[in-house]
Amino acid sequence: MGIGGKGEPRYVGIGEAIATKLASYGANIVLGYTSASSKPNAEALAKDLESRHNVKTLPVQADLGTVEGPESLIEAVKSSKALLKPDGSFQIDILVNNAGVAQNNLLPAVTVAQFDASYRVNVLGPLLLTQAAEPYLPRDRSGRIVNLSSVSSSCGFIGQSVYGGTKAALEAMTRTWARELSERCTVNAINPGPVLTEMYAGNTPQFKREIKGWIEHSPLMRVRPGIDSQELIDDAPISGGRPAYVSEIAGIVAMLVGEDAAWCTGQVVCANGGMLMLH
């Protein structure tokens, strides 16, 4: 978290953290963003990653909540020729399905519009993007796909009929793709709990009270004086502990896309500090 305009906090998103982490390992990066207002930030991040890590980057605007958006993203990357291999071929080694929206509402108040928007971005988007990327995946099992799920798929949080359902669907697709794409890549999901992002900061006090008990019993969410910020320490009695830092989520993605993770596929991997312990 940094400081944005007019003294307001600027939260680093999970996608930015993942891009930064993978670039630090030498991966060329495609930065997908939705709205034109995000273009300056995406371009600034691209230049920063190129300068710091000597990698190639390509910001691409595409709305993954539309039917056309996922394919347009892949075609834009391919046609730009910026990330072609030395022999002129085009290959996608790593795909991270990170785009997501959360619209919490109690059952009587859930609308069709909320359902449609959530499933378009959180379920149809990853499906169509993976479908568009499939022809360009490696053919030697070296590819990696990581889907960003959530503990909400399993916890039954109040107000998350729709959001939790989208993430459960994504986990189901993860297992199917792990089988269908087994000769091309591994496919895994991770399931963050609360993460220090703008989305988490926007949660209502009621929702934060609902998940406080979960946080209190998560072994790695206890605050650490002298390590965690004073703001998180002061907030702990209210929230139950600290959320994850985006770098901690990015580190688990990096672990799953490395060569040493070649024997792991079809899994939902813990990225929540022990908030959820299943299977």
Image: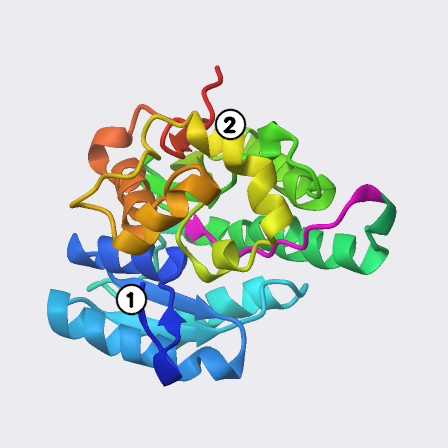
Q: Say few, some or many: other residues with alpha carbon within 10 Å of mark 2 (under 14 / 14 to 19 / 20 or more).
A: some
Q: Residue at x 57, y 30 (%)?
A: 176
Q: Residue at x 55, y 70 (%)?
A: 72
Tell me the kind of residue under disc 2.
Arg
The label on residue 68 is none
Q: Which residue is mark 1?
A: 84
Q: Is residue 175 above or below residue 103?
A: above
Q: Main secondary structure of the magenta part?
A: loop
Mark 1 and mark 2 residues within 8 Å of each other at the beta carbon: no
Q: Residue at x 56, y 34 (%)?
A: 171
- Residue 61: % across, % down: 49, 75
- Asked if one can make out residue 249 in the rendered structure from this viewpoint, the answer is yes
Q: Say few, some or many: other residues with alpha carbon within 10 Å of mark 1 (under 14 / 14 to 19 / 20 or more).
A: some
Q: Is 2 or 78 nearer to us in this picture?
A: 2
- Residue 199: % across, % down: 51, 58
Q: Which residue is mark 2?
A: 179
Q: Is residue 213 left or right of residue 53?
A: right
Q: Is residue 192 above or below residue 130?
A: above
Q: Earlier in the sequence, mark 1 or mark 2?
A: 1
Per the image, label 2 sits on a secondary structure element best described as helix
Per the image, label 1 sits on a secondary structure element best described as loop
Q: Is 140 or 72 nearer to us in this picture?
A: 72
Q: Is residue 141 above or below residue 10?
A: above
